[in-house]
Image (tube, helix red, strand yellow):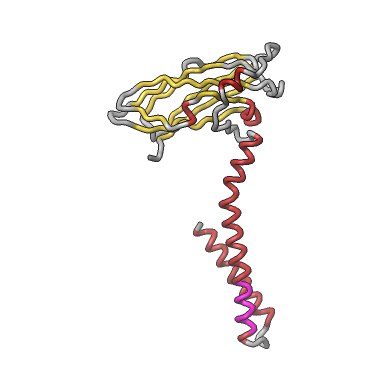
Amino acid sequence: MGAFWNFFSYLFSIHISTCDKEMNVAGTREEIDKHRRRLVIKLTLVVVAMFGFGYLLIPLYNAFCSITGLNGKPSSSAVSATQAKAVKIDTNRTVSVEFIATVNSDLPWEFKSEVYKVSMHPGEIVKANFYVHNLENQAVVGRAIPSISPGLAAKHLHKTECFCFTEQTLQANESREMPVVFYIDPDLPEAYSNMILSYTFYKANT
């Protein structure tokens, strides 16, 4: 940020110098000051607009990715079991889903999936179990962040149950089984026959 302001100040000084030369000494001091004030107002508006765009860019990007699934970010809300059971199973297709479980270095937990991979039909409801163990002698709160690859397939994977929906508190040396219940909707393009569902546990900021 400091480099940005240094660069901005440098451009500002160059612009002021150039404007002074263009106005020449023949211009009155009042005219020069007036011109400078207008310039400062314009540049201030530009800076405010840039910062405003920067703050809006993140929620706009998240909204875009949520709709398109471009960043592999699955939905953070559950689908009802009734809705899941109403989906017709496409027995003519099989999709392979690989599971990856990792833990951020700040979180003293062990985390793994029960199985490495499952094969399923689109529309079929599958339950996958994950196991987590707290290595600390005190309670620790963690939060799992999911990701799906390829990214464009993310919007086609729906969960009725997942430990990633809420923060998880493990007591000292506690171990726990954490299930994920999901299905892949039949609208998944036929080009996608392999998917990766990964979770990374982070220490929650509580």
Counting labels gives: 0
For residue 39: magenta?
Answer: yes
151 up-or-down from 86: above or below: below
139 up-or-down from 55: above or below: above
When asked about the image quadrant of residue 173, the answer is top left
Point out residue 105 in the picture as x, y percentages from the top left corner.
40, 33
- Location of the C terminus by quadrant is top left
Task: Work out whether residue 126 can be spotted.
Answer: yes
Point out residue 8 in the picture as x, y percentages from the top left corner.
57, 64
When asked about the image quadrant of residue 10, the answer is bottom right
Residue depicted at x 61% and y 67%: 43
Task: Work out whether residue 11 can be spotted.
Answer: no
Point out residue 182 in the picture as x, y percentages from the top left corner.
56, 21
Residue 167 as seen in the image, left or right of residue 100: left
The span shown in magenta is 31-40
For residue 160: magenta?
Answer: no
From the viewer's side, name the closer residue of 95 and 127. 127
Point out residue 194 in the picture as x, y percentages from the top left corner.
63, 20
- Quick one: which residue is furthest to the left in this view? 137
Q: Main secondary structure of the magenta part?
A: helix
Residue depicted at x 36% and y 21%: 175
Residue depicted at x 64% and y 84%: 31
- Quick one: which residue is furthest to the front in this view? 82
Residue depicted at x 65% and y 17%: 122
203 up-or-down from 60: above or below: above
